[in-house]
Image (tube, grey):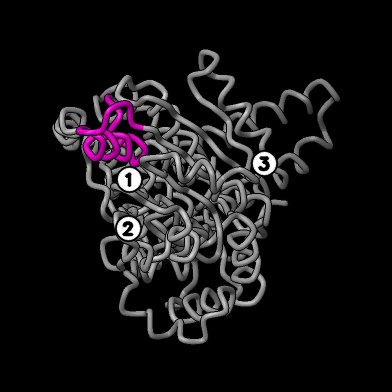
Amino acid sequence: MPHPFKAVSLSFRQAPLAIRELLALDETACRRLLTQLRTELLLTDVLVLSTCNRTEVYYAHDDDQSAAIIQALGALKQRPDAASFAPYFDRYDAADAATQHLFEVALGLDAQVVGDQQIINQVKNAYQWAADADAAGPFLHRLLHSIFFANKRVQTETGFRDGAASVSYAALELVEELTADVAGPRVLVVGLGVIGADVCRHLAGSKAFGSVSVCNRTRARAEALAAEFVPGRVQVVDFDDLTTALREADVIVSSINHATPYFTPELVTQLDVLSYKFFVDLAVPRSVAVEVEQVPGVLVYNIDAIQSKASAALEQRLAAVPAVRGIIAESLADFADWSREMLFSPVIQRLKAGLETLRQQELDRFQRKATPAEAKLLDEATRALMQKVLKQHVLQLKAACRRDEAAQLLPLLSELFDVENQPALA
């Protein structure tokens, strides 16, 4: 009987940004949903993953719980109409489909920018949250460690991670294109989360810009980032002076984490745009209101509008896709073998208990007449014999699992050793 592992996914493939941003979760919300799914829906092996491109829940349960999960997600986001979002979700109701999907997501195959390196760290964070909530069982632990090992193989054996074809690098190339005809363009990065900080590093490393400034609610974070570069390369703007910095900037890259858009038409209208001003919004939910583009001279590019600009790196990554899929296939095969073996682990334990019972019975018969030295030798000899016998049966059973023949071998072993009537080992 296969493991009841499943997944429900809201991603850029099915859902536009306008839908995804309504159900996006920060760390606190992910942890809260994880606990709720484990305690209220009694789901096991739960993993909650939310990025700018997807919100997904992986779980184990005999029945499809996707409707209940979507409802719980909607309640958490205070969206009573969450059921209407159901058509935007993909469902993976079989363990092999759900595990393959998680492999492809984690390794960057199912990413808006193929090979995006940020997603594996986001998966690691989600796994840590699951472990903290005691929501990860042996299946999920083994699956995630298999994925992390496969990720190392991808990094060392392929060119899939070469180049800088990430969302942050795509943003850099977009900004370079937008300002190609601007002399000494001034760029302001607002919000220094993971993506915002990465964008800033790319911008600071480019010679295409006259100035790069950063602004963050927590000034210390902005100062720490600016300290990574030569003095003066990245200027720090105090949050209280943001409006002035907005007026001076040609391009504003925003990754502000906020429930509602921070940049509103009212705010942007006050900037008195004389020529063109570009907003590149990398946040989910959006930090730049859709109506901002109605302000004369302002153009807005959101996360869905950012296409891969790193063409050479992308081509190299696409060329490595077959090798990555090969690594995934090998990893999935190894994981499937382990999964099948785990299903018969209780039988193996009872088989071991049965053999141990037989061994103890025979020892009791002979040790009464033996000296302490002889009794010790009898114990060592019978223990070694039992282990050899058990090893052969376990190897045969594992081989049968790999051949999908365990169902035929198990009844024979059970009958031979009266497995069903043996207590499990403590």
Mark toward the start of the polypeptide (3 vs 1): 3
Q: Is residue 165 magenta?
A: yes
Q: Which mark is residue 332?
A: 1
The reply, left or right, for residue 258 in relation to residue 403 is right
Residue ID at (45%, 32%)? 200
Depicted 258 relative to depicted 118: above or below: below
Q: Which residue is mark 3?
A: 218
Q: Along the horizontal axis of the image, is 171 left or right of 68?
A: left
Q: Quadrant of residue 27?
A: bottom right
Q: Residue at x 46, y 70 (%)?
A: 22
Q: Give, as a three-letter code, the residue at label 3.
A: Thr
Q: Could you tell me which quadrant the N terminus lies in?
A: bottom left
Q: Position of residue 314 (x, y in %)?
A: 19, 34
Q: Mark 1: give few (<14), some (14-19) or many (20+) Cα within 10 Å.
A: many
Q: Which residue is mark 2?
A: 96
Q: Are marks 1 and 2 in contact (CB under 8 Å)?
A: yes
3D distance between C-alphas at marks 1 and 2: 8 Å
Residue 145 visible in the shown view: no
